[in-house]
Amino acid sequence: MLSRTASFRAESLGQSVLQLVGNLGFALFVLGVLAFTIIAATYHPDDPLLHASSKLTSFLTSTSSATFRSDDSVLRTGEDFLNASAASDDDSSTAIRFSDVSTTAAGDCNDKGGPIACKDPEVYHVMMHTAIETFRNNHFYRFGKPVPGAGDGRTCDMAWRFRPKDAKRAAFYKDYRRFELARGPNCTYSVVKIGDYHTGVNARKKKNKLKGGPSAATLSSSSADESDPRKGEKALVVPVVGEAVNDTLPVVESEGMFSAGKYLIYTGGGDRCKPMNHYLWSFLCALGEAQYLNRTLVMDLSVCLNSMYTSTNQDEEGKDFRFYFDFEHLRDSASVLDERQFWKDWALWQKKDRLGLHLVENFKITPMKLAEVKDALIMRKFGAVEPDNYWYRVCEGETESVIQRPWHLIWKSRRLMDIVSGIASRMNWDFDSVHVVRGEKARNTELWPNLARDTAPEALLSTLGEKIDDGRHLYVATNEPDISFFDSLKDKYPVHFLNDFKDLWGENSEWYTGTQSLNNGIPVEFDGYMRVEVDTEVFLRGKKQIETFNDLTSDCKDGINTCRTDS
């Protein structure tokens, strides 16, 4: 009995242990599968482009060296790093917003020959309905109140805010057009015709001129709290292309306000007349230091355009920062002053108010060492020896991890982006695009052995035929000066080039009058940098985008054996 019982218990115990181990193993397996499923469903890769602006520098530059490396590509600015969803998130909903209009019809229906009352709700609704039906490739966000158009009693102007469907760029757009209307029986209305892009000029809201300049708070150390990289991030805003531009220069209203301010200025150096990306890389270093020190950046708005962008092939002085960048956004988002106005005020009040100047002549003196300087003005003076006289050297070394270049403050000129919007609107925001690089690269068969052959008309027609449907509007961004080179494409596609839209920067354009007013009444040339920027931005708004070095040829962008391979 005892022997049998002991044997039975030993066998039972062994089986129980095996069963327990099996159950534990299965439970661990189930838990592992469950944990993996949860992680896979919730994990999102770290994408630097979705981070706040202060994180972008670490994505764009090497952490081991901040030295700028030249690149012939079109300059990327702050709005290029905004996710397209940011524009949608900026509005609390995607529903169309309608401005309030009178509910009482303002017109006599019996007077068939009388003027049409643009404020009549029926007129308003038929204009909105027609716009929505006509521009089906747009998402509408807000309509403005109709106003009388040409003064003939038959036209009304109306503005609206929209985003193109499937937009890849984070921005809103504003259009205002002239509607020709007809009145039918029983006070019914119909739209006879809708004018072209930005023809409804009476519906365009004009911005008030900037009154005064930075406040005393703006010029004090407390002004940068919202954008100070040591105190927190400032919320990103989304560009609105098509709004009236007010890029007047800020001024300090009083002696007291000026004397209460703290300033930073960079002078001299070897950055002048360098390519635009070099210029901006250095400028953003200065702006980043000013924000770190909670000081107003005193900036020179005069830009020297590098010869690579000019028709004379010579460097050209006298360009204005506002020709190329959105100064209104910069002025409203950061504390900046025009250098010429600053020195006038400094001469008036510096001695009287005993304003101190702290001179720095060595770029190795870091911003961290200047944080406790009490003088009104810190002046960084750069010498004549390159590359040690480049402004961006200030942001190298240990400073690189402290000074974050504020990319979000620099946007492309909204006057230029309005041209981009005008071109896209004329193609109803429904087009495909191809970028065809030829020129010197096509002639250099040692570095680009296949480029000339792969971008020849016959090859283009064959390649595009496989990628783009017949009859689609096709925008060709190219450096090929002879556009007849692309005539063979016209048998399959309505083909468009930048020069097809040159009226958008011609003498009667908004761009022409706007830049002329910035240039003391002297007309401004639509230079090479502007052309490349507009050409590229239109290309980037195509629904299908065919690149030269990704889609048309196997050659590498920077020459033979330089293609990047994905790891």
Image (cartoon, helix red, strand yellow):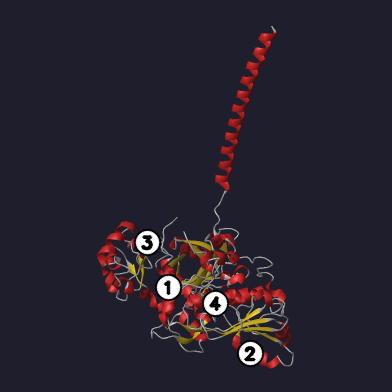
Q: Residue 294: which quarter of the image?
A: bottom right
| Residue 329 appears left or right of 534 | right
Foreground: 308 or 254? 308
Which mark is first along the chain, 2 or 1? 1
Q: Amino acid at mark 3?
A: Asn
Q: Which residue is mark 1?
A: 72
**Badge 2 element:** helix
Near mark 1 (Cα within 10 A), the count class, few <14, some 14-19 or many ≥20, is few
Labelled pair 1, 2 in contact (Cβ < 8 Å): no
Q: Position of residue 391 (x, y in %)?
A: 56, 79
Tag 1: amino acid: Asp
Task: Assess disc 2: are there few (<14), some (14-19) or many (≥20) residues with their C-alpha within 10 Å of its C-alpha.
Answer: few
Mark 4, residues whose alpha carbon is within 10 Å: few (<14), some, or many (≥20)? many
Which quarter of the image is occupied by the N terminus?
top right
Mark 3 vs 1: CB contact within 8 A? no
> In x, y percent, where is residue 264?
64, 81
* Residue occupying the point 48% across, 77% down: 276
Rounded to the nearest angstrom, the CA distance separating label 3 from label 1 is: 17 Å
Q: CA distance from mark 4 to mark 2?
A: 22 Å
* Residue at image mark 4: 282
Cα separation between marks 3 and 4: 31 Å
Which residue is farthest front? Answer: 3
Mark carried by residue 550? 3
**Mark 4 falls on what kind of element?**
helix
- Residue linked to disc 2: 343
- Image height check: is 271 above or below 535? below
Residue 96 visible to an observer of this rendering: no
Q: CA distance from mark 4 to mark 1?
A: 17 Å
**Could you tell which of marks 2 and 3 lies nearer the N-terminus?**
2
Type of the residue with mark 4: Ser
Q: Residue at x 27, y 63 (%)?
A: 459
Q: Please, what secondary structure does the residue beneath circle 3 have?
A: helix
